[in-house]
Amino acid sequence: MAAAGICSRRQAENLIRAGRVTVNGEPAVLGSRAVPGRDDVRVDGRPVASGQEKVCYLLNKPAGVVTTLRDPQGRPCVGALVADLPWRLFPVGRLDQDSEGLLLLTNDGELAHHLMHPRFHVPKTYVATLDGPADEAFAAQLLSGVDLPDGRLEVLDAVLRGEETPGRARVELTIAEGRKRVVRRALQALGRGTLRLRRIAFGPLQLGDLAPGDLRPLRADELAELEAALAGAKRRAEATEEPSQGRQGEAQGS
């Protein structure tokens, strides 16, 4: 289902557990196998098409929009921003409702799985506007790592970017994980609130001058760079893992 662009791998597991997936008329279970083009796979009674064109779009998510395809509370969601496209896309990871910037959407479940997997450590770069000043010592604090209740955040890079308005510093920081609101929580742990948070890069991809609410398909060269970055991350992960850990990681990613 992920390969067909129906949903992410995690969402596919939830659909199977909920009994909404059948293979050749029988309820699917986790671990069920199906051969594209031969077996009849359905979700809620509707067939899953195979061989769908794989696409990936880059969206500049505006603040105030939730990273879901639909929202039961009626809040603005990214699903409305891609509703006119002929593919059923789903977001790669999340940006908080109050955050903005680069968000990928795709129907390629395999690509999304690898981009979100913590094993591959895809870097993400943010620009945060703080509710107070910041100096080089503050940047150094970030670079030394920030202890949070759910574990330490390692910051790969931190650079001061001047002030947005007097007394409100901007800092650009790069991390390689995606815990909930982790950038805001890290800045808060160092005594600074976040007035604005914008993601400007995801791996080799750059937000550039794309306007809020606009989206565009990735270019062929960008897809190639993304795939090369993932291949490099996979090699590094395999080189640093014990043999048993590597096998377990591959099993979880299958």
Image (tube, rainbow, N blue to C red):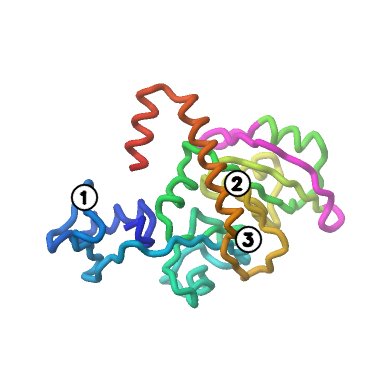
For the view shown, which residue lies furthest in the top direction?
242
Q: Which residues are magenta?
A: 145-167
Asked if residue 82 lies left or right of residue 213, the reply is left
Query: What is the crowding at mark 2: few (fewer than 14 residues within 10 Å), some, or many (at least 20)?
Result: some
Q: Residue at x 19, y 63 (%)?
A: 40
Q: Amino acid at mark 2?
A: Gly
Label 1 residue SS: loop
Whether 75 is drawn above or below 144: the answer is below
Query: What is the crowding at mark 3: few (fewer than 14 residues within 10 Å), some, or many (at least 20)?
Result: many
Q: Is residue 163 magenta?
A: yes
Whether tag 3 and tag 2 are in contact, CB under 8 A, the answer is no
Q: Position of residue 192 (x, y in %)?
A: 71, 46
Q: Amino acid at mark 3?
A: Glu
Disc on the earlier residue, 3 or 1: 1
Disc on the earlier residue, 3 or 2: 3
Residue ID for mark 3: 100
Q: Position of residue 185 (x, y in %)?
A: 60, 45
Label 3 residue SS: strand
Q: Amino acid at mark 1?
A: Arg
Label 2 residue SS: loop
Q: Residue at x 54, y 63 (%)?
A: 57
In three-dimensional space, the C-alpha distance between marks 1 and 2, rounded to whole angstroms, equals 32 Å
Name the one closer to the observer, 215 or 183: 215
Residue ID for mark 1: 33
Residue ID for mark 2: 203
